[in-house]
Amino acid sequence: MEYKRISDANIITEKYMDSILIEERLIDSVVADTAIEFFGKKYDSPVMTPAFSHLANYNGRELNGLEEYSLAAKELNILNFVGMMENEGFKKIADTGADTVRIIKPYADNGKVRDQMQFAKEVGAAGIGMDIDHIFGGEGYDVVVGEKMGPQTADMLASYVEDYGLPFTVKGVLSVSDAVKCAKIGAKAIIVSHHHGRLPYAVPPMMVLPKIKEALKGTDVKIIVDCGIATGADVFKALALGADAAAVGRSMMPSLEEGGVRGVCDFVTRVNNDLRFIMSSTGFNSISSIDDSVLYNGPLP
Ligand SMILES: Cc1cc2nc3c(=O)[nH]c(=O)nc-3n(C[C@H](O)[C@H](O)[C@H](O)COP(=O)(O)O)c2cc1C
């Protein structure tokens, strides 16, 4: 007989997000503006692309999925993210002209980490970062596509901030403890994430977000959320709970696979339109004015 428990953080995260409900505040409200400022630049939406890697050339198209969504990010004027890849791959992303943050793996070979950071800087990346939630695996340090990962100390992270002079993003922060360390090392952003459920029973990013927001008060660290973000309502809840932006990930994939650049543009536009509708309907006319006073904790569906 099979004995099973739900330890899947993706399911738990979705249930938590769906348990948060929103009230309306319509009188005196106007159509909202979704523009944001991030790393000193203006963008049209707080919706961002995910730090993805290893995508295919869908439906026989000439461009890889990573290039396609990067071109969409440029067209949409949103901040773009990419994940694990060699420098040759990142050159193609840089050539799309999108403002791109390169999230580099915590390779055990620190020379490789630094080579990728230096290359990102040389080809004009908008920022660099590291997904610290890929350091460990079941047998010790993780091995990702044949590459060994290694531990990252606060001093090492501080040296990446210091040595490359680019805005640094730590991806995979899921505690006040790590968030405070990120502020201390001079990170300019964190991505509150469990990396699509790597940790069983990982706390939903939106559940830990208010505590992280409070702990980072008075710092200039921006907060991005990912994991299960699929709609404008998800983005709205993340912003209301303390995020500055939210990244869509796997929810974008069907549109990317079917429609390429156009598909991603249409998908993100839909998410942003939903967000604008909810902001307008709750009386918040700018992203920075959104707060959690319109949220309710309902029963889990
Ligand atoms: C195909 C694929 C490749 C990914 N590659 C990376 C990566 O190289 N670096 C990284 O930090 N995260 C990577 N991620 C994790 C995503 O950036 C994101 O944190 C995760 O998918 C959760 O968001 P979602 O639920 O919206 O998909 C990858 C996810 C997928 C599905």
Image (cartoon, rainbow, N blue to C red):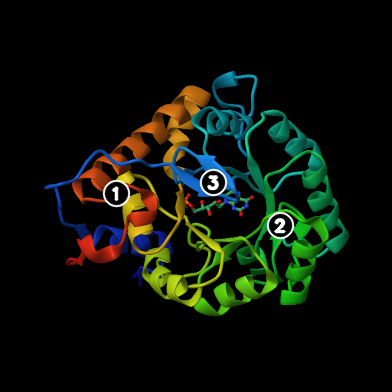
Q: Nearer the viewer, mark 3 or mark 1?
A: 1
Q: Which residue is mark 3?
A: 50
Which sits earlier in the primary sequence, circle 3 or circle 2? 3
Foreground mark, 1 or 2, reads 1
In the rendered structure, the answer to whether residue 21 lies left or right of residue 12 reads left
Q: CA distance from mark 3 to mark 2?
A: 15 Å
**Marks 3 and 2 in Cβ contact (< 8 Å):** no
- Determine the residue positioned at 77% across, 45% down: 120
Q: CA distance from mark 1 to mark 2?
A: 31 Å
Q: Residue furthest bottom?
A: 177
Question: How far from the left and from the top, in percent, is residue 266?
Answer: 40, 27
Which circle marks residue 298 in the picture? Answer: none
Q: Which residue is mark 1?
A: 233
Residue shown at the point (51%, 47%) measured from the top left: 37
Residue at x-position 62% and y-position 71%: 182
> Which residue lies most toward the right here?
111
Within 8 Å of ligand 1, the CB of disc 2? Answer: yes
Q: Secondary structure at mark 1?
A: helix
- Is residue 13 shown left or right of residue 80? left
- Whether label 3 lies within 8 Å of ligand 1 gets the answer yes
The C terminus: image quadrant: bottom left
- In terms of secondary structure, where does tag 2 sit? loop
Counting from the top left corner in percent of width and height, residue 21 is at 20, 59
- Where is mark 2, residue-wise? 105
User: Which three-letter amino acid code belongs to the residue tagged 3?
Assistant: Pro
